[in-house]
Image: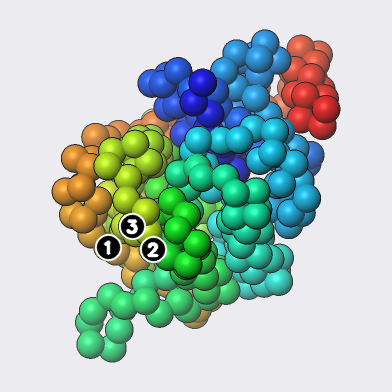
Amino acid sequence: MTKALITGITGMAGSHLADYLLKNTNWDVYGVARWRSSLDNIQHLLERVNNNDKLFMRYGDMNDQVSLITILTEVKPDYIFHLAAQSYPLAGIKAPIDTLNINILGTASLLESVKVLNQNPIIHVCSSNAIFCMSPYGNLSVNPTSIYAISETCKDLLGRYYAEAYNMHVMTTKTCVHTGPRRGDVFAESAFAKKIVMIEDGLSAPVIEVDNLDLVCTWADVRDIARAYYMLVTVKPLSGAYYDMVGTHTCKLGDVLDILLSFSTVKDIKVKYTRKSLSNVVDVQTSDFNKFGSHTGWAPEYTFEQTMSDLLDYWRRKLKGKSRVMNFETYRLRDAVKKQMIR
């Protein structure tokens, strides 16, 4: 039986990748999570976990190599999707050592564990196109301008190094900003969507405070990216290959807010400017998917408008009845998952 291991399965991208694999393959899917990880993003999958229905959870930590070796020894995966990361750029400013430890040393620990166990899975190391920055000459170049971007640059280089130095089947991607349902509210577009829904529900005054709406990003839908990750490891996978994995929609953050506002049921929401973002937050994140698209045939399927509409609907569902505590069944499922993870 084919086995896939997903680090960071409880994150947005990891949970959507699990959805895709469970729907489109007959693989056994193993997720790695810390004991304190929120299970909200895989809440809809917990029944499958508790019934051992093609989805299994294992406790591990990217900063604890022993836990990684234990999991790899048990699972012996055919595919590894390394998505675990500290992915919030501003957290890199507040907690730089933690960001570097998780993203760099955690990646090295995973790859080194595979090496010492003499396993040969196909490995996907996910980096970010935050490593790019606009040069003074108007061209994009690898020029990380934050702790987060530095850590993602190192992840990309580590993947290439282990592929070349040890003949391991590692491929790396520099993925653009991807969003959609389950996007955390620490990210601007999701924070906007959540605020709009709170306004619609009468939980907040009809005012959205913003700072830098001139930030330019290339956006992709997380569900398109999950499909791309699957194609990366299954469609003519090339050891040592590296790709820019992006969508086709590039716009300013202000345009994103305008689209979200156009979908709101409240039409008199005001936008209030407060302050500019921190200077070392990347101002431009754009790239090109032609190399990966040509190799695999992948192309985005979701329009940006659909992604934003679905993001709003996600928050409408999530905030509905938010004042209620979780019911007993939810606690039972969580407890069962925790027990399975530590057995």
Amino acid type indicated by mark 3: Ala
Residue furthest toward the front?
Answer: 118
Q: Is residue 109 above or below residue 199?
A: below
Number of the front mark, 3 or 2? 3
Label 1 with label 2: CB-CB less than 8 Å: yes
> Residue at coordinates 30% horizontally, 84% vertically from top-left?
135
Q: Is residue 60 left or right of residue 232?
A: right
Q: Amino acid at mark 1?
A: Ser
Circle 1 Cα neighbour tier, 10 Å, few/some/many (<14 / 14–19 / ≥20): many
Residue at image coords 75%, 41%: 70
Q: Position of residue 103 (x, y in %)?
A: 60, 62
Q: Type of residue at label 2?
A: Asn
Residue behind mark 1: 287
- Image: 51 above or below 203: above
273 lies above or below 190: below
For label 3, the residue is 241
In terms of image quadrants, where is residue 41? Answer: top right
Can residue 266 be seen in the rendering of this structure?
A: no
Can you say which quadrant of the picture contains the C terminus?
A: top right
Say the numbered circle drawn on residue 129.
Answer: 2
